[in-house]
Each structure stands twice: as structure tokens, then as C-alpha cells.
Image: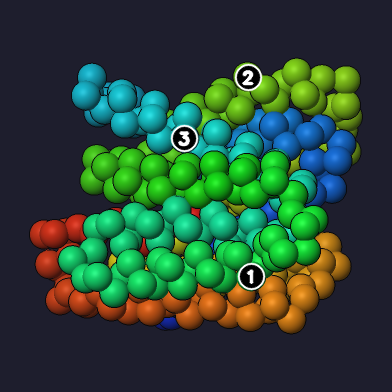
Amino acid sequence: MTTRGPRTGSVPPWTLAITAMLSVQLGSALSVHLISSVGPAGTAWLRLTAGAVIFLALARPPLRSLRWHDAPVLLGLGVTTGVQTIAFLAAIERIPLGTSVAIEFLGPMTVAALWSHSRRALVWLGGVGVGVVLLTEPWHGSINTAGVVYAGLAAVGWAAYILLTRQVGDRFTGISGLTLTVPIAALTAAVIGVPQAAGHLNLGVVVAAIGLAILLPVVPYSLELLALRRMTPTAFGTLMALEPAIGVLLGLLVLHQTPSPSQAVGILLVVLAGAAAQRSGQRRPSGSEDANPEPSASPAPF
């Protein structure tokens, strides 16, 4: 135990956060191929199930410390995670990855704006909204309504995820909470995912799902937990504003989704507005952050 602290401390926390975001978006980009085989709900079910097995192999669920009042929050977070995952995968099946991430980013931005005591946060939220309009380019008349709606549902899920995660994080430490909520998320996704994937399962699909589960959620969530222990929510949230841009980059490199000039301006606006909204918060001295927690930043949902 005495040697782990220095090794972890030698890695800058921002590199952990950036690596986590790269893993999230790479996992999302690579999920598109699996979606074509077993559908978005089937992909969510397989990925979350593999993630649940991995988390249970890494840690024991804290069953002895459970209390009755923990059940609603744990169930709520698990169900929210399952629904959000299906919605986001259904979105990237229909619209570009970067656009989906930008729309989904409206969730945490709304939470931050409503929780903030500054009116400027509402201005930054409006900036993200303008960026999303530029990304979807409705004036071309070819907007995929279903994709935007699914991404909007994912945004609502991310907002709820943030609020519920803070409650679970206050109750359980490390990845112990994940050993409870990820299996619930997998069962939630199974309701639609099992029928959707039925008849399309083979060894290649299962292996792909396990690999994707490592990319998302296992690696990013573990790295985000380490980063959050050494960063303020404001600093972490500022870095999270890069996630839509990372989504565009990996959409370009992996899925060959080239943004138009107006979409490039839109993603830049989303990133700048997101970073400005987080930076408007105040950094608290070490040890005082929990005195008045702000749900302005949270690990990305699965």
C-alpha cells in the first residue's frame, strides 16, 4: 500500500482524464460496427454485461454495507445508465459521433447552469446550444430527427447520471459502487437488448463486446476515479469540455465522418462554452470541496 501512492502521484491527473475521454470516444466509435450486427440495445447489453463481469472480478460488491435507503439511488443509477447507453448508441447509429457527443453534452451543461449561482452559466449553455445547431445543420433539411431525439435522451440520462453518481459516490468508495450499478444497467439493457441481439450472437461478437467493455466503461471509469481524487470538479469539468472535440476527431479517424466548416465552428463553440462554464466556478482549497458539492462535473456515462 505504501508504494502505490507515489506511483499514482507521479502521473499528472489531467493525463488520466484525457486518456479516459479518448478511451470513451474510441469505444463509442468502434461500437458502430457491433451496432450493425446486434443493434444499439444489443450492443449496450453485451458491453454492459461484459463490464459488469469485469468489475465483479476486480472487486466484491459491498453487500454487507447496503442499507434499505441505498436501494432507490442504486437502482436509479443502474437503470439510468442502461437507458442512457442504449440511447447514445442509437444516436451514433444515425448521426455523426461528434454531433451525438455535443448534444449529449447539453446534459451536464444544464446541470452545471442550474446549479450555478451565476447567470453567465446560462449564457454558456446557450453557446453550447448554438454550437449544436451548427452541428446538426437543420437548414440543409436533411437532419436525422430520430438521431437527435436519441442524443437528447442521452443528454437527459447524463444529467440524471451526474446527480445520482454523486449520491452513490458519497456512500461507496472506489469501484465498489460499480459492482452494484453496472449489473443493474446490464439487466436494464437486456430487456430490449436480448431480443435485438437474439440470432446474431457468435464468438466474434462476444469477443468484440468484451474488448469494447474494457475501453468503455472499465478503463475510463477507473482512470476518472483516480483523476477526480486529485482534481477539483471545476478543473475536471473544464477538461471534460474537450470530449465533443475528441468525439469529432475519432469520428473522423475511425468512422471517416468529416465535419463541414459550419460543423467545425459548432464543435469549437461547444468546447469553448463548456470550458468557460466550468472555469466560472471557484476552485476550493483541498479538503473543503465536499462542504458544498457542485454537480458541475462527473465521469462520462457508459
Q: Residue 168 in the image: x percent, y percent?
A: 30, 40
Q: CA separation, marks 1 and 3?
A: 28 Å
Residue at 33 percent across and 41 percent down: it is: 164
Q: Nearer the viewer, mark 2 or mark 1?
A: 1
**Residue at x-position 40% and y-position 61%:** 109
Mark 2 to mark 1 CA distance (whole Å): 35 Å
Q: In the drawing, does residue 206 fall left or right of residue 151?
A: right
Which is more N-terminal, label 3 or label 2? 3
Across and down, in percent, residue 240 comes to 47, 68
Q: Which mark is residue 134?
A: 1
Q: Amino acid at mark 1?
A: Leu
What amino acid is labelled 2 in the image? Val
Question: What residue would you read off at disc 2?
Answer: 191
From the viewer's perspective, tell me whether residue 69 is left or right of residue 274: left
Q: Position of residue 103 (x, y in %)?
A: 57, 57
- Label 1 Cα neighbours within 10 Å, binned few <14 / some 14-19 / many ≥20: many
Number of numbered discs on residues: 3
Q: Quadrant of residue 111?
A: bottom left
Indicate which disc residue 80 carries: 3
The N terminus lies in which quarter of the figure?
bottom left
